[in-house]
Image (cartoon, rainbow, N blue to C red):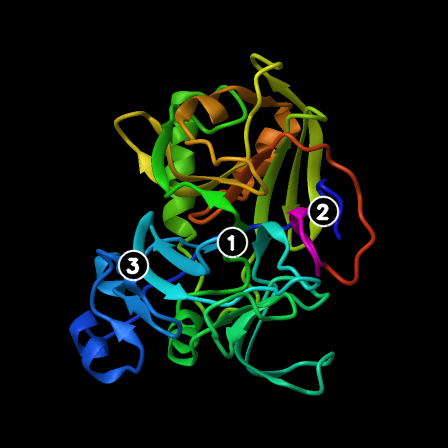
């Protein structure tokens, strides 16, 4: 059982435009696909929906709902796919929290469970938790991984990349578009907005096959009043956070940078709330990120790394270092490995 604390972290979310046939073609040719997302409660084990045309490009985020045994895929804040899944069985529970894809391997085999095949693997932890194709009996049955229908895992593999955020939760909100009037974490001048806009245009979302994509995340802990920026597993900036209304929780949120908002003279983010256990996911709003300020060196480090898909995470858990193997960075709420 993992402690109910931040053990370390690594985030990022982005993807690229993938040329795919219309959803109607997939419905006719791909086993298990359902050509609707209007009533996903009717999906049977092994079934899924796939509508990439609903949002052809933009940052991707994946939400795994443990109670529903469903995987939701959002691109640029719009749901493009839903799939049934099978998560960890009792004694081998799937941990909850915010993860990023650490490694991709189309033909992976388990080093722990008798060389068992794990097709289209998107690794979440070096200790063995991943998204991959597997048997779906209709209930939690894995050793901690998230099993997916084979055909769905193939399609998902085409829109993820190293750094794509994966939220595993008991409760979650759908992505909500929020705009911050400024650059987040500090005051800004008019010319800085133009500079940020230029940086976003110069740094498009990463390609799914790019194993060298920069994984950049900004983590704000309300408990410790700290802000940390991590790039490819290394802390590049860290300092105190000034949080207005400090007694008011920040909540567990993931903010994924989307695009400049010219109307607000700021940046637009897709925000997702999540919770584990008996908690309910709060609806994120603009006030969460407008309450946070950082020291100039941290603000500058963030400005230098601005790109579509950058992830900012807020949490009310304390920030504590963990023992780890390699660069296994996660924010972990609870669960069994």
Residue 310 location in percent, x, y?
49, 46
Residue 329 lies in the magenta-colored region: yes
Quarter holding residue 157:
bottom left
Most prominent secondary structure in the magenta stretch?
loop
**Relative height, residue 290 to residue 277 (above, below):** above
Q: CA distance from mark 1 to mark 2?
A: 15 Å
Q: Secondary structure at mark 1?
A: strand
The image shows residue 204, relative to residue 22, as above or below, that is: above
Q: Callout 3: helix, strand or loop? A: helix
Residue identified by numbered label 1: 165
**Residue that mark 2 sits on:** 8
Residue 40 badge:
3
Which class describes the residues within 10 Å of circle 2: few (<14), some (14-19), or many (20+)?
many
Q: Residue at x 73, y 65 (%)?
A: 127
Tell me the crowding category of disc 1: few under 14, some 14 to 19, or many 20 or more residues within 10 angstroms, Cα based: many
37 left or right of 298 in image: left
Q: Which of pointers 3 and 2 lies earlier in the amino acid sequence?
A: 2
- Earlier in the chain: of badge 1 and badge 3, it is 3
Between the residue at mark 3 and the residue at mark 2, the CA separation in whole angstroms equals: 34 Å
Q: Which of the 4 image quadrants contains residue 207?
A: bottom left
């Amino acid at each position: 059982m993992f402690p109910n604390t931040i053990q370390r972290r690594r985030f990022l979310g982005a993807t690229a435009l993938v040329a795919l046939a219309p959803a109607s073609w997939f419905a006719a040719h791909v086993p298990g696909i359902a050509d609707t997302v209007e009533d996903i409660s009717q999906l049977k084990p092994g079934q899924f929906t796939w509508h990439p045309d609903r949002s052809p490009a933009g940052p991707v985020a994946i939400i795994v709902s443990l109670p529903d045994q469903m995987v939701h895929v959002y691109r640029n804040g719009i749901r493009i796919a839903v799939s049934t899944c099978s998560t960890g069985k009792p004694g081998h529970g799937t941990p909850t929290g915010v993860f990023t894809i650490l490694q991709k391997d189309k033909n992976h085999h388990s080093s722990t469970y008798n060389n068992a095949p794990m097709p289209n693997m998107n690794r979440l932890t070096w200790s063995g938790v991943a998204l991959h194709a597997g048997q779906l009996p209709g209930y939690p049955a894995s050793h901690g991984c998230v099993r997916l229908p084979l055909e769905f895992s193939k399609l998902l593999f085409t829109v993820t990349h190293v750094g794509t955020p994966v939220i595993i939760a008991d409760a979650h909100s759908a992505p909500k578009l929020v705009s911050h009037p400024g650059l987040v974490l500090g005051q800004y001048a008019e010319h800085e907005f133009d500079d940020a806009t230029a940086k976003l245009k110069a740094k498009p979302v990463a390609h799914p096959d790019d194993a060298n994509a920069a994984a950049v995340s900004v983590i704000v802990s309300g408990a410790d009043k700290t802000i940390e920026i991590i790039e490819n597993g290394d802390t590049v900036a860290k300092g105190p956070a000034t949080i207005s209304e400090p007694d008011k929780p920040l909540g567990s949120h993931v903010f994924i940078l989307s695009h400049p908002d010219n109307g607000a003279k700021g940046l637009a983010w897709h925000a997702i709330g999540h919770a584990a256990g008996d908690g309910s996911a709060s609806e994120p709003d603009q006030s969460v990120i407008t309450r946070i300020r950082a020291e100039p060196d941290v603000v500058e480090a963030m400005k230098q790394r601005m790109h579509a898909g950058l992830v900012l995470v807020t949490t009310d858990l304390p920030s504590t270092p963990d023992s780890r193997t390699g660069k296994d960075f996660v924010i972990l709420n609870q669960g069994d490995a």
